[in-house]
Image (cartoon, rainbow, N blue to C red):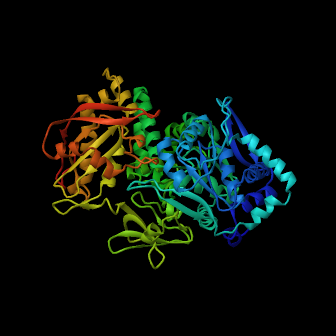
C-alpha cells in the first residue's frame, strides 16, 4: 500500500494485508518459561479472527468498548485488533491500578466485556462486578490459579477462541463482512488521560489519526518491516500504542514482549532491539544502575570509565551527528568505544539500536547528552494522548539537547499569546468520550488543540518546552518559575528519584526530594552506614549531606543561566516515603500530581518557608492489598548554598 492508501484504511485490514504479503514474517514474540515463542503475521491473523468471532458469539457488537488489562502480551494486543475487527473500541487500562481506580474507567466507558491477563486482574474485576454488574463477560489469558474459578461470564481466552472457531465455521462470511464495514474515521481506541489535574478523560482516537502518526514517524526515521521493538511499557500509555501497535501494523515489524516486568533488562539484552522507546524515568534508572556498578568497580576501571566518558561528553554527540571533530579526538573516541561505550551499550541491550525515543515527560539535557555521547541515537518525541504522541520530532544530524525538535511531518505547531503550544494535524483526537464540554475547551474554533504546555521557538524553529503552562509562574521578585525544569536537573543525579519544587509567588525556591533507595542504599553500604528501610535511610545525616551536594551542583548550573538564576533552591527536605500512584501522588505514568502533593503536604511547605529546621508529619498510605496504614517521621529541613549569577561552584 502507498501512504495515501494507508491513511484510508483500518488496522484490521492492515493486519490481513501483512498476512498476505509477509505471511511467515515474525509479527510477535513472547518469552515464556525462558523460551521465546514466535507468531507469524499469518498466525496472528488466524488468532485474531478466532477471538473476534468468539467475542461476537458472546454478543460483542459494533460500537461497544472492550477493556484490556494486563502486562504486554501478544494475546492482549490481538484482543485490541479483534475488537476493531468487529467495529468495537479497545480500552486498555493500567495493569497496576487498584480496583478502586479501575471502576471509574469501566463505568465511564460503559464496559461489559473485558480481556485480561491473569488471576490478579480477574480478582480485581470480580470485586468491581459487585458494584458494577454491567461487567458481564471476562476472558483471561493465563490459567495459573484459575482452576476453581467458575463465576458466570468468566471464560478462558482459549475457550473463547474455540467458541469463535465454531461460530466462524457456522458463519464463514461474518468476519470479513465486519472488517469491511470498518471505516478510517471510526474510533479505534480510547486511551484515558493520566489525570494530573482531575478525573481522567477518555481520548477517542480513530484509525486514521493513529495511522497518520505511524506513517509520519516511520517515514521520518526510515523504519522497515525488519525492525525489532521491545514492548514493555503500559499498553494504556499512548506511546506504547503508537510504537507497539500502530507503527508495528503500518510497517509490519516485530513486537517482542518480555517474560515479566522483572526480566525486562535481561530480555532487552537478548532481543537487542533496533528501535527502542522509553520514558525518561527508564533512561534515568539505566544510568543509575551504570553509576552504581561503576562505584563498585576497581579503581582502574573507574579511572578508564571517567576518562573516556569525559572524551564522550566532549565530542561523542558531534561524532554521532556527523559533525567535524579533530582527528585526535576521533582516535580517542574510537579507543573509548572499544573499551567503554561498546561494552556499556551491550550491557544495556542497546547495541543494535538505530533510533531510540524518549517521551512522556521532559528529559534533562545532561541525561540526554550522556546517551548520545556514547553513540546511542536517542531523540526526544513530543506529543500528548490527544495527538497520538505525535507533534514534534528531532531530525538526525540536527539534535538540540534543550529542544523537542521541529514540527513532525503533517503537523502545524504555533504558540498562543501566552506561550501555550497549539497543534493542528490529522493525528488529533476525535473527542473526549461523553465530554463535549471538555472537547470544546481544548479544540478552538480554528481547529487547534491546546496542549497546556508552555514553549518557545528558537531561531531555527526548534520547539523548547518549558513546563506545563498551568505550572509556569512568577516568583515575587519577577523571575519565571518553571518547576519541571528544575526537577529534571535534580533527577539527573542517580541518588534522586523524584523531586517537587515550589516557588510560585514565593521569594525563594524550596524542594521535596525522594531518594533512590537502590542508589543511596548502595552508597551507604559501601560506607558502613546501617539503615532499616526507606524512612530510616532518608532521615540519615549522611543522606542529607549527599543530597545537599547534588542540589548545590544544580544551583551552580542554574546560576549560569540568565533566565533561571533566580530559581536556585534555598531549602529542601527528604520525604519520609516515596511518592506513589497508589497514594494518588503520582499518575500511573509517574507524573507528579503537583496540586495534590502541595495540598497533602501543606504542613511541610509551610515549614520550609517559615524557617523551621524540622517538621513532624504523619501520612496515610495505601498498600497493594487495599489496606491502609500510616508512616510518621520528624523531617529535617536543610539550607543549601546558592550562587551569584556570576559565580561558579567552588
Residue 290: where, in percent of width, then height?
Answer: 45, 36
Q: Residue 298, relative to residue 219: is it above or below? A: above
Query: In the shown orientation, is residue 518 left or right of residue 128?
Result: left
Query: Which image quarter holds the C terminus?
Result: top left
Q: How many marks are shown on the rendered structure?
A: 0
Q: Residue 443, relative to residue 398: is it above or below? A: below
Q: Nearer the viewer, residue 229 or 57?
A: 57
Residue drawn at x 41%, y 61% as measured from the top left: 403
Q: Nearer the viewer, residue 113 or 382?
A: 113
Q: Nearer the viewer, residue 96 or 547?
A: 96
Q: Quadrant of residue 284?
A: top left
Whether residue 236 is visible here, answered yes or no, is yes
Residue 230: where, in percent of width, then height?
Answer: 61, 45
Furthest toward the left, the residue is 611
Query: In the shown orientation, is residue 522 left or right of residue 559?
Result: right
Residue drawn at x 74%, y 67% as measured from the top left: 181
Whether residue 377 is visible here, answered yes or no, is no
Furthest toward the bottom, the residue is 446
Query: In the shown orientation, is residue 89 left or right of residue 491?
Result: right
Residue 183: where, in percent of width, then height?
Answer: 69, 69
Amino acid at each position: 500500500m502507498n501512504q495515501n492508501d494507508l491513511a484510508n484504511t483500518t488496522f484490521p485490514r492492515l493486519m490481513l494485508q501483512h498476512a498476505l504479503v509477509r505471511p511467515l514474517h515474525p509479527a510477535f514474540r513472547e518469552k515464556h518459561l525462558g523460551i521465546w515463542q514466535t507468531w507469524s503475521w499469518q498466525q496472528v491473523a488466524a488468532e485474531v479472527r478466532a477471538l473476534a468471532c468468539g467475542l461476537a458469539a458472546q454478543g460483542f457488537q459494533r460500537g461497544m468498548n472492550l477493556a484490556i488489562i494486563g502486562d504486554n502480551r501478544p494475546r492482549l494486543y490481538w484482543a485490541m485488533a479483534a475488537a476493531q475487527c468487529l467495529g468495537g473500541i479497545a480500552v486498555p487500562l493500567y495493569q497496576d491500578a487498584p480496583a478502586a481506580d479501575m471502576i471509574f474507567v469501566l463505568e465511564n466507558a460503559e464496559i461489559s466485556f473485558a480481556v485480561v491477563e491473569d488471576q490478579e486482574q480477574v480478582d480485581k474485576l470480580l470485586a468491581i462486578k459487585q458494584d458494577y454488574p454491567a461487567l458481564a463477560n471476562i476472558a483471561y489469558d493465563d490459567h495459573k490459579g484459575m482452576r476453581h474459578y467458575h463465576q458466570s461470564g468468566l471464560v478462558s481466552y482459549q475457550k473463547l477462541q474455540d467458541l469463535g472457531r465454531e461460530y466462524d465455521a457456522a458463519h464463514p462470511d461474518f468476519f470479513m463482512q465486519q472488517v469491511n464495514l470498518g471505516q478510517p474515521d471510526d474510533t479505534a481506541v480510547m486511551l484515558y488521560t493520566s489525570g494530573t489535574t482531575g478525573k481522567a478523560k477518555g481520548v477517542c482516537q480513530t484509525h486514521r489519526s493513529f495511522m497518520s502518526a505511524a506513517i509520519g514517524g516511520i517515514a521520518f526515521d526510515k523504519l522497515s518491516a525488519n525492525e525489532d521493538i521491545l514492548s514493555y511499557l503500559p499498553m494504556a500509555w499512548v506511546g506504547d500504542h503508537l510504537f507497539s501497535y500502530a507503527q508495528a501494523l503500518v510497517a509490519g515489524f516485530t513486537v517482542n514482549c518480555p517474560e515479566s516486568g522483572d526480566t525486562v533488562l535481561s530480555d532487552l539484552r537478548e532481543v537487542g532491539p533496533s528501535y527502542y522507546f522509553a520514558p525518561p524515568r527508564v533512561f534515568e534508572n539505566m544510568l543509575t544502575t551504570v553509576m552504581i556498578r561503576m562505584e563498585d568497580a576497581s579503581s582502574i576501571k573507574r579511572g578508564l570509565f571517567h576518562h573516556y566518558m569525559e572524551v564522550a561528553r566532549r565530542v561523542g554527540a558531534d561524532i554521532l551527528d556527523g559533525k567535524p571533530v579533530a582527528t585526535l579526538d576521533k582516535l580517542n573516541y574510537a579507543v573509548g568505544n572499544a573499551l567503554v561505550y561498546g561494552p556499556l551499550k551491550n550491557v544495556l541491550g542497546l547495541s543494535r539500536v538505530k533510533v531510540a525515543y524518549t517521551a512522556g515527560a521532559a528529559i534533562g539535557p545532561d541525561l540526554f547528552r550522556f546517551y548520545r555521547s556514547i553513540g546511542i541515537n536517542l531523540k526526544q518525541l513530543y506529543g500528548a494522548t490527544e495527538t497520538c504522541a505525535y507533534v514534534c520530532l528531532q531530525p538526525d544530524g540536527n539534535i538540540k539537547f534543550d529542544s523537542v525538535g521541529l514540527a513532525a511531518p503533517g503537523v502545524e505547531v504555533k504558540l498562543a499569546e501566552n506561550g501555550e503550544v497549539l497543534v493542528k494535524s490529522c493525528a488529533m483526537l476525535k473527542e473526549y468520550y461523553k465530554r463535549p464540554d471538555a472537547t470544546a475547551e481544548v479544540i478552538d474554533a480554528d481547529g487547534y488543540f491546546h496542549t497546556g504546555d508552555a514553549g518557545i521557538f528558537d531561531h531555527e524553529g526548534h520547539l523548547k518546552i518549558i513546563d506545563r503552562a498551568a505550572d509556569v509562574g512568577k516568583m515575587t521578585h519577577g523571575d519565571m518559575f518553571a518547576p519541571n525544569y528544575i526537577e529534571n536537573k535534580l533527577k539527573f543525579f542517580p541518588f534522586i528519584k523524584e523531586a517537587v519544587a515550589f516557588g510560585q509567588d514565593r521569594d525563594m525556591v524550596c524542594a521535596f526530594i525522594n531518594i533512590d533507595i537502590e542508589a543511596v542504599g548502595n552508597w551507604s553500604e559501601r560506607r558502613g552506614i546501617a539503615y532499616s528501610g526507606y524512612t530510616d535511610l532518608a532521615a540519615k545525616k549522611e543522606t542529607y549531606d549527599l543530597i545537599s551536594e547534588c542540589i548545590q551542583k544544580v544551583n551552580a548550573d542554574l546560576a549560569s543561566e540568565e533566565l533561571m538564576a533566580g530559581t536556585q533552591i534555598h531549602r529542601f527536605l527528604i520525604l519520609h516515603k516515596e511518592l506513589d500512584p497508589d497514594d494518588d501522588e503520582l499518575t500511573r505514568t509517574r507524573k507528579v500530581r503537583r496540586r495534590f502533593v502541595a495540598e497533602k503536604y501543606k504542613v511541610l511547605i509551610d515549614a520550609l518557608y517559615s524557617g523551621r529546621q524540622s517538621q513532624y508529619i504523619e501520612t496515610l498510605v495505601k498498600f497493594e492489598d487495599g489496606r491502609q496504614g500510616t508512616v510518621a517521621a520528624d523531617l529535617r529541613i536543610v539550607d543549601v548554598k546558592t550562587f551569584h549569577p556570576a559565580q561558579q561552584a567552588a
